[in-house]
Amino acid sequence: MPEIRLEHITKRWGKFYAVEDLNLVIEDNAFVTLLGPSGCGKTTTLRMIAGLETPTSGRITIGDKVVFDSEAGINVPANKRKVGFLFQNYALWPNMTVYDNISFGLSNIKEPMDRIDFEAKNAARLAEILAAPAEAAKVIEDCRDRTGKLDEKKAVLKLIDAFTLSQFTAKRLLGCHPESGKDFASEVAALKEKAEAGKKAAEAAGCTLDAEYRWCKDGKPVQQTRKLTKEEIDLTVRRVSRIVKIGMFMDRYPAELSGGQQQRVAIARTLAPEPTVLFMDEPLSNLDAKLRLEMRYELQRLHVETGSTFVYVTHDQMEAMTLATRICLINNGVLQQYAAPLSVYHKPANLFVADFVGNPSINFIEAKGTQAADGSVALTLLGGHKAVFRPKEATDLSAWFKQRDADEAALLAEKKRKAGEKGAVEKGNKDEVFRYHIARVTEEDDSLAEEPVITNGDFVLGVRPEFLDISDPNGLQGEIYGAMPTGMESTIKVRIGDFLLTGVVFGSSLFTIGAQVPVSVSGEDIMLFDRKSGKCVCLGSLKV
């Protein structure tokens, strides 16, 4: 499967930027989820890669083929990109059976393919089965009812699965009656002669037939522009139906299937043309919670079995965290972080990523402080309480701030350069700053407050709920503000002064509103954010 590369991809309508300067590499056989809030540019990005939307500028490469280049004037149509697209609403034909829905697109394919002598191939396969008919006979005999009547439809399906045949070849095999016990020597000889005639016909044209009965010349398969045969279409439909486990529904109509079964049909139809990449736009959003969970397992299995590259759009972080090998988190058309799920959770790139990923939400705590000689950071937080933050790895804050300022200066210079270019468009929606939320007992209207002066001594701590500890007797004095038992754990709100912190306590403990509890922070994955830029400086431990 190919690698997908996006270089400086931008999509805008007038002054509105849907996607801005996106650079992304999706590795071969990856399962990448495009994650972010509604309207952030996830689906637009997916549609641009698939060829359903034209970027304003940039370059897209799938494998070794450039499918879009704004400067070179390249824009390969969607049907030539060899990709599959699974839509949110499945888009099944209600008047067609499952079989017809899956095969519909295959019948319209006309492109260079290997030339195959199917008559010779099927004759050779039938000769092989009839030369030792005992196995086929057993399959057929197992399809008789209590009265001994043969269920021919069931027998055909069983033969298809047992010998990997098309329905047409399976019906021919059934018509030979291998269960009759007769000697098939003459039939086998005639079939072998037919297969040999195919080989001689190829040799007469200066070619040979390989083991798959493909025409070959000089050791390479001969290509011809053609449509798929009924044999090829049926074999493909049967193959993908086995992958998604819907072989028993071939004669049903979509209205006769459950939501999960309809989704399997849509997946099978998408897999049938053997796309190099499979795109999925929130395919589970119409399913109930239990079925969504089941289908997540199915998608994981499908990714492993097909070996394809999956690009999956969702705004559900649970789906993203459980399915993806890498998460591409987008906000307002701008890439925020591209990393493995656990990296996104434990080491977010900035305040937005930390806030968006995780349920219950992360605790943000504003703090002021300075770095000591030993590398620790002395902080004042939660209304005057003292704390010490110790970085997990050696971190020089002055050097970090210097690099931050240099990066911001370079970014500003690049913006000025682009603004001076002819035809440059002023951004209409990309300069919005993410505002993190500090939970308080008494909420204030931020719009009425004066903007504070931010210095290098201003930080924001990110504390995941599982790191809040109420068992340490040396912790700060807190008060239970709310508690919600959820079975194996409880989510609690703890009040410290006017501030509210969210914690997760494992076990069956009962909490009383207003009860006094000690509050401390455990673990070494506490996040220290630079308040000025919003970027994550480092991870470490916090002693309050």
Image (cartoon, grey):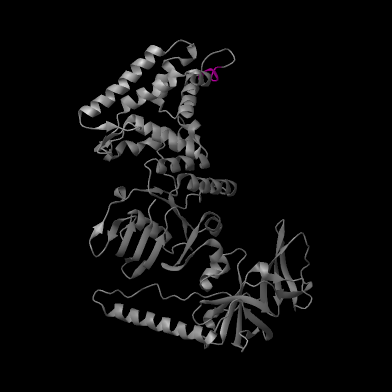
Q: Position of residue 166 (x, y in %)?
A: 40, 28
Residue in the picture at 36% in, 33% down: 233
Residue 141 in magenta stretch? yes
- Specify the segment rendered in magenta: 140-144
* Quadrant of the image occupied by residue 362: bottom right
Residue in the picture at 49% in, 60% down: 326
- In this image, 179 relative to 544: left or right? left
* Residue at the outermost left position: 205
- In this image, 109 relative to 504: left or right? left
Residue 251 in magenta stretch? no
Whether residue 96 can be seen here: no
Secondary structure mostly taken by the magenta-highlighted segment of the chain: loop
* Quadrant of the image occupied by residue 165: top left
Q: How many numbered circles are shown?
A: 0
Q: Position of residue 335 (x, y in %)?
A: 43, 67
315 vs 203, nearest the viewer: 203
- In this image, 502 relative to 511: left or right? left
* Quadrant of the image occupied by residue 107: top left
* Residue at the outermost front position: 218
Image vertical order of residue 14 relative to residue 445, above or below: above
Whether residue 362 can be seen here: yes
Q: Position of residue 212 (x, y in %)?
A: 35, 33
323 vs 138, nearest the viewer: 138
